Image: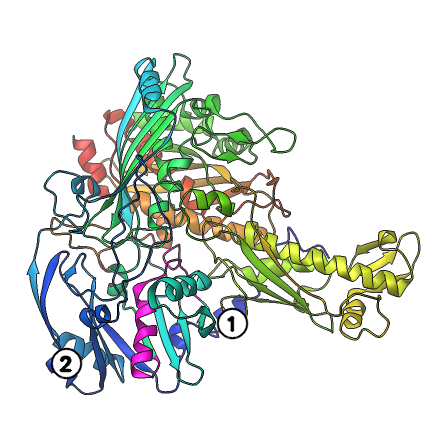
Amino acid sequence: MTYIGKSVKRVEDQRFVTGQGHYTDDIVLPGITHACILRSPYAHARIRNVDTTTAASMPGVVAIFTGKDIAATGIVGVPTGWQVNFRNGDQMKEPPHPLLVADKVRHVGDSVAIVIAESYAQAKDAAEAIDVDYDVLPAVANPAAAAQPGAPLVHDSAPGNVCFDWELGNPQAEVDAALASAHHVTSLDIINQRMVPNAIEPRAAIGHYETAGDKYTLYTTSQNPHLTRLLMCAFVLGIPEHKVRVVAPDVGGGFGSKIFHYTEEALVTWCSRQIKRPVKWTAERSESFITDAHGRDHVTKAQMGFDADGNIVALKASTYANLGAYLSTFGPAVPTYLHGTLLQGLYTTPKVYVEVYGMFTHTVAVDAYRGAGRPEATYILERLLDTAALEMKVDPAELRRKNFIPAFDGVNQPGYQTQVALQYDSGNYEPVLDRALEMVGYDQFRKEQAEARKQGKLLGIGISTYIEACGIAPSAVVGALGARAGLYESAQVRVQPTGKVSVYSGSHSHGQGHETTFAQVVADRLGIPMEDIEIVHGDSESVAFGMGTYGSRSLAVGGSAIVKSIDKVLEKGAKIAAHKLEAAVEDLDYAGGKWTVKGTDKSIGFGDIALTAYVPHDYPQGLEPGLDFSSFYDPANFTYPFGAHIAVVEVDPDTGKVTLKRFIAVDDVGNVINPMIVDGQIHGGLAQGIGQALFEGALYDENAQLINGSYMDYTMPRADDLPSFEIDRKITPCPHNPLGVKGAGEAGCIGSTPAVVNAVMDALAPFGIKKDLTMPLTSEKVWRAMQG
């Protein structure tokens, strides 16, 4: 059987749908204690005093630690994993992010003290009894406001709130000149609002110190257990790595928010050493809203210039990117190397200039959220294009088509070199747009829309064509760009004596279906049943090293590492088979799980070779026993999925309510291993992208208080808010990895948001609305825009 390209049901779902999933909060260790972290109710305040006297005497309390206790040990805090320099070459500002704050809180939710008790209820009661004397100070939440003279400072040691200012592309003067001489220039002020990830499983961590052997185990809800171990050991607690095991068991979603090394992970590990007992912390949902890294939050001024024929001549974008109060693990990379580098889009724009100001504010840290920089870049481009089409009275589909980069496969034609550093691997952009237009019935819709407007109905159609960069690589390049870790992946393929196969992957699955798709790759390559394969991940004691799962990298990078190890298995297996069959290696073919001498019926099965490798009685001289190989795969380039999304909406002229009537997505993610899983990934991404367009957004008031920090106030899309998605795909293989795959986990989230907003703006075209409406496009905002 050929497994690649088959919609095999997810093997891991059996345990999930029967309640057998094993999550961090499910773990109960002997002598376990429970932690509650006292968090600041203020966005900015000096801590005058922390009185724990009453709390320490309450029932069940085991220990209480404050910021002064941590500071006394010399522990500075959690580092960031990416360095971005100022445009003049100066290093970015990198203030410490303490495990517990000793002097000044810098956002609502900042950690002040930790209470450890026999039960969580006892810990929470005691935490509420701690008396903290705060001197409340002014705060700022908006990144553009934080850049203004006189804005409240987030960090006293850093003059101003600018963490870095960064630029990329053609010289600014050249771009300004191109815009000045353009036939038409479209300008927009764009806000890409802050998003809260809201993974279904709250973050949790258990620190377990064992005096026997002086060893630590951290159980954590992480997408990236090995990086967490590296950062915690080398930069936070100073513990030798070989004494620390990090386990990320089943993880209930992440959307980026569980990539990062959080203070709570190091804190419970340190606390366990102090009390010589395991310490468990699990976030309450309201706590997640004010501690999980948020996403997006960009304020941008953008201009796009065109010549008289509608060809783009220049793009300029200036962005204030909110980084929050502290730098998260990849926070500085998102608005720069994952956003600025994608502002070429699918278009032949000859002049591009982007500048980004990374700003500290009195808010939760901002980092990667599904799409991470690429949705922000796509939103700028696609809103500019639709607005320009309206202003120039041209069809938005044709305006895009006119400016598409010509097709290239990266083999017969070289990759496309952009103006913003990247070189695209392969692309064929017109077919995805053509197919999407065909599916929606574009020409017919325009006729129906015109008739509907005569009757007072407001129908709109919005197009978005996008490209994204996945599988960030290679390590040498990203290192030069500021990454403080390699971005390869590892895989070990261990063939057991019976021919069964164990695969140890450095990637981590938290909803992606790795246990299925990785097994499909192995089964297809080895010609053995999927049932004979197990996929192991998430445990630093089982997997030598890995860089985790994020940026749609799992199959393109992690899957390629598996293929490298399989190739080594087959190479050695061929030598053993040649010996057993008394033939030369080059005279053998491998197919269907057996080696066959070409032109004969002489063959030997994979299982027989596996047994021979471990019972080497009749064995090639000089060849060591065993059939077990490890590999590291460091990609030659990013991969670049792309696609076209189209939304159809109806706006109620009386209330402003937006109804999403249809959504079409045609994506090209390269070769597809499991179509069903890819469809599921696309569906999930579409729901989140639509959520940003119409429903979601974190709101801070003038005191930097999060005012919608619960599910009572933070709106996410429900099933009845979404239509049945209509999806299709094209295939342009990646030319530089062995599977030809590109990545599918974030595509839906990247193209969908501007498609929906463009559709709403198209519906509102009769009202002559000029400015960009700020997402989410709630009924109130749309109604007010119509009244204006």
Q: Is 660 included in the stretch rendered in magenta?
A: no
Q: Is residue 762 above or below residue 93?
A: above
Given the image, on which type of amino acid does mark 1 rest? Glu
* Direction right: furthest residue: 600
Residues 371 and 239: in front is 239
Q: Position of residue 607 (x, y in %)?
A: 77, 69
Q: CA distance from mark 2 to mark 1?
A: 38 Å
Say left or right for 253 vs 716: right
Residue at (21%, 82%) from the top-left corner? 122
Q: Is residue 508 above or below residue 55?
A: above
Residue 237's label in the rendered image is none
Provide the residue span drawn in magenta: 251-278
Vertically, is 573 above or below 324? below
Could you say whether the residue bearing mark 1 is in a helix, strand or loop? loop
Can residue 154 be seen in this snapshot?
A: yes
Q: Secondary structure at mark 2?
A: helix
Disc 2 marks which residue?
55
10 Å crowding of disc 1: few (<14), some (14-19), many (20+): some
Picture residue at 38% right of the left edge, 41% below the top: 375
333 up-or-down from 30: above or below? above
Q: Mark 2 or 1, which is nearer the eye?
A: 1
Q: Position of residue 746 (x, y in %)?
A: 45, 47
The amino acid pointed to by label 2 is Ala
382, 152: nearer the viewer? 152
Which is nearer the eye, 544 or 196? 544
| Residue position marked by numbered label 1 in the rendering | 541
The quarter of the picture where residue 755 lies is top left
Percent x, y for residue 721?
35, 49
Q: Position of residue 138 (x, y in %)?
A: 9, 51
